Amino acid sequence: MLVSLVMLEPNFQPFPILETERLVLNQLVEEDAEVYFRMRTNPRIRQYMDKDPDENVAASLKKIQEIEGTRLENKAINWVLRLKESNEFIGDLGMWRFDIAHHRAEIGYSMFPAFHGKGYMTEALNRMLDFAFQDIKLHSLEANTHPDNESSMALLKRVGFRQEAYFTENYFYAGKFLDSRIFSLLEKWRS
Ligand SMILES: CC(C)(COP(=O)(O)OP(=O)(O)OC[C@H]1O[C@@H](n2cnc3c(N)ncnc32)[C@H](O)[C@@H]1OP(=O)(O)O)[C@@H](O)C(=O)NCCC(=O)NCCS
């Protein structure tokens, strides 16, 4: 079946605040630098990230500014998960590496361990997926995980992602070539 595609033009202006039953998904701001630093250096969160941690709060602040820069260019979008009842920063999620011609983007997420096992990320991710497919008009999404990242893979499968590839030693970090699992989601696969 042939489809005619309208040019994908992601637009993140003004910042799209999203809501779920228990969460507000809003903007990562410079005042979040300290908590963002704590998240990006948390050993449990970093366990399967395979990236160097930020060295200090200033480095995390710089990252926040870069994220805001890419949002202003409509190249990426990142939300903070805040509990509605307390406004507490519990994690983040976002989309980047937009492949405009093919209506595809990559997703990522992280959350403080104290909030794991309560369904918050499933709730946030489902809301972001509505936005991705219905507002931005993406056709597919991609997620790239360390092969042993069980909780991330469980999250992806819970919302309908399917593993489509296993790449052997495609990622170099800390003196080793590591494997990756590549997951995809089409809107019709959502669960
Ligand atoms: C990936 C990550 C966000 C998943 O966190 P999580 O707590 O497992 O995910 P959710 O918030 O959706 O919670 C789901 C769990 O809560 C349980 N749960 C409890 N109440 C729930 C509710 N009301 N609704 C849905 N699930 C609920 C689910 O059963 C599930 O538990 P299970 O995994 O034991 O079956 C977390 O492990 C993380 O931050 N990891 C570090 C960062 C990382 O690796 N990022 C990915 C890089 S690729």
Image: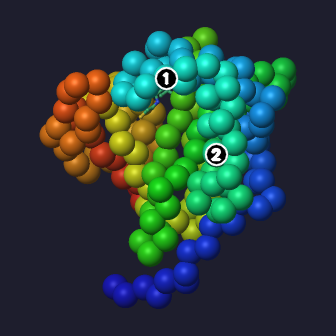
Label 2's element?
helix
The residue at 84%/20% (across/down) is 86
Residue 112: x, y in percent?
59, 18
Residue 83: x, y in percent?
76, 26
Q: State left or right for residue 79 relative to residue 168.
A: right
Rounded to the nearest angstrom, the CA distance separating label 1 from label 2 is: 16 Å
Image height of 83 relative to 182, above or below: above
Q: Residues within 10 Å of mark 1 (few under 14, many from 20)?
A: some
Image height of 22 relative to 20, above or below: above
Q: Which residue is mark 2?
A: 67
Image height of 9 relative to 96, above or below: below
The residue at 62%/37% (across/down) is 63
The residue at 41%/29% (across/down) is 51
Q: Amino acid at mark 2?
A: Ile
Label 1's element?
loop
**Looking at the image, which is closer to me, 53 or 166?**
53
Q: Which residue is mark 1?
A: 53
**Looking at the image, which is closer to me, 56 or 74?**
56
